[in-house]
Structure formats: structure tokens, C-alpha cells
Amino acid sequence: LIKKKDKNDFKEVKIKDVIIGGQATTIIAGPCAIEGEEQILRIAETVKAMGGNILRGGAFKPRTSPYSFQGLGEEGLRLLKIAGDEVNLPVVSEVMDTREIEMTDKYVDIFQIGSRNMQNYSLLREVGKTNKPVILKRGMAASIEDWLLAAEYIASEGNLEIILCERGIRTFEGYTRNTLDLSVVPIIKEETFLPIIVDPSHGTGIRELILPMSMASIAAGADGLMIEIHPNPDKALSDGMQSLNFKDYEVLMKRIRSLSEYL
Ligand code: PEP
Ligand code: MN
């Protein structure tokens, strides 16, 4: 269902007045995890002020260790919605479990399926039964074919509002957290009409690499970016190492907007 039919076949996913796909370069930014009302409100204002399009924030966090901060749960989703409404931006958050879809649906405009759940087929089928857009992150060990077939699970239930997100894969390289596979951008564009965005935060794990890899993603044809930002990254409860502060986020937005004008 998601195969490209001809050269000019591409889909625009619309969320309120935001478009992902086509001519747009859509920026999704926000904290790895929602930590409290003040934090998410300040971030929302910054995302908006710098021209970001969608606010992200994790409430149910798929942490590698069960002893790490797990997120604020439903309370986090409530705060995310308040912050999004405050600055008039759509919001996205990860759903990890079929039992949480109905509750999450009350707060978010877009569901995110995380890397660890890319092949959770019952979860894919359930979000496929909703009518909300779904960001499907690439599994950290998933081939392009695995990933597209995962998208097919969502589509097969009737939901074609799918945005693919490259977030890096596991390789032998230990310098970076993951190896960001930017070659998938033109390949995905060849194989499917669905939009593809890139997450250079998880894709590298290193905040200094976010700007250059963002530029490279857009140059490669990505429809947008997902970036982790935090008012004080060194104090973040999760993924501070790969989060930009507000100043660096501003620089990134300016560079991306001027690059997009050339494309
Ligand atoms: C995230 O975006 O917060 C996240 C956990 O990403 P991933 O699923 O790509 O690890
Ligand atoms: Mn994160």
C-alpha cells in the first residue's frame, strides 16, 4: 500500500496547519522527556519562537535501564498538551503499549512508535486503526525492508498517515551512540511516497553532531527533522548529551531555514 506508483507520487501528511512531506521542511523539537510544567512550557515557547512546527516530548520513556527515569506518564502528556495549546503547536509523544493508545489519543496530535517497538506488530496494527498520523522510527537493527513492512502493518489497517523517521542503527562503531544512515533518505523516497524525517539526536548521541547531520539530512532530501532540546542539557533527566540548548537550537533553525531555500 505504501509503494510509490510513479516519480511524482508523494504524500503530504497534514496535522492541523502543519504539513510533513512535499515542499515543506518540518521541524519537530522538544525534550527527550517532559520533566515538569515549567520545563515544557519554556521549551514550547522556544520551539515556536524559532519557527519550529511541532512540539515533541516523551512521557512514557523506553529507557534501557528500568532504574533510569521512566517519564511522567499521563501527567506528562497532560503537560505536553497544555504547552502545545499555549503556543498553538501540534504535539507528538511515544506510545509504547497497545493499552495506552486510547489514553494517549486524548492528548497527542501524532503518535510516535519508537525504535524498540518498530516490530511490535500488535502496536502497529492498533495505531493503524486510529486516524492520527504516526511517526514510525526505524528499528535500531532493522533493514529498510523490515522498516517498510512495519509501515505496511499500519497502512494495512487503514491508516496511511505515516511519517518514517531515520534515527540511526547499531553498527560496530562505538564513537557515536548509533550510526546515522542518511543513505536511506533517497532510498525511501524511491521506494515509497511516505515522508521521511531524520532524528540526528538519537542518530549520533552527540550534541555537536546535530547541526552538521541536520544540514546533511536536509541536503539529502529529508522532509524534516526531530531534534531534542533542553534549557539545561547537562541537567536533563534523559539524553542530555544529545540535546541542544536554546542558543544552539536557534543557530540550527537559522541554518536549516537558509539551506532549505536553496533546495
Ligand atoms: C525518542 O525519540 O524519545 C526515542 C526514545 O527515540 P528512539 O525510539 O529512536 O530511541
Ligand atoms: Mn531521547
Image (cartoon, helix red, strand yellow):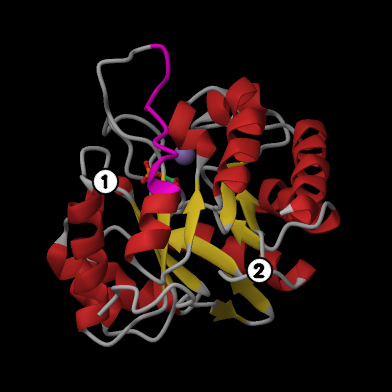
Please check the rendered image and state whether residue 29 is part of the magenta-colored stretch, yes or no: no
Q: Residues within 10 Å of mark 2 (few under 14, many from 20)?
A: few
**Left or right: 214 in relation to 145:** right
Separation of residues labelled 2 and 1 (CA atoms): 27 Å
Q: Which residue is the site of mark 1?
A: 139
Q: Residue at x 71, y 73 (%)?
A: 85
> Extreme top residue here?
175
Residue 177 or residue 76, whichever sits in front: 177
> Which x, y percent locates residue 104?
41, 71
Q: Which residue is the site of mark 2?
A: 23
Secondary-structure class at tag 1: loop
Q: Main secondary structure of the magenta part?
A: loop
Span shown in magenta: 175-185
State the quadrant of the N terminus. bottom left
Residue 94 or residue 187, whichever sits in front: 187
> Which x, y percent locates residue 212?
64, 29
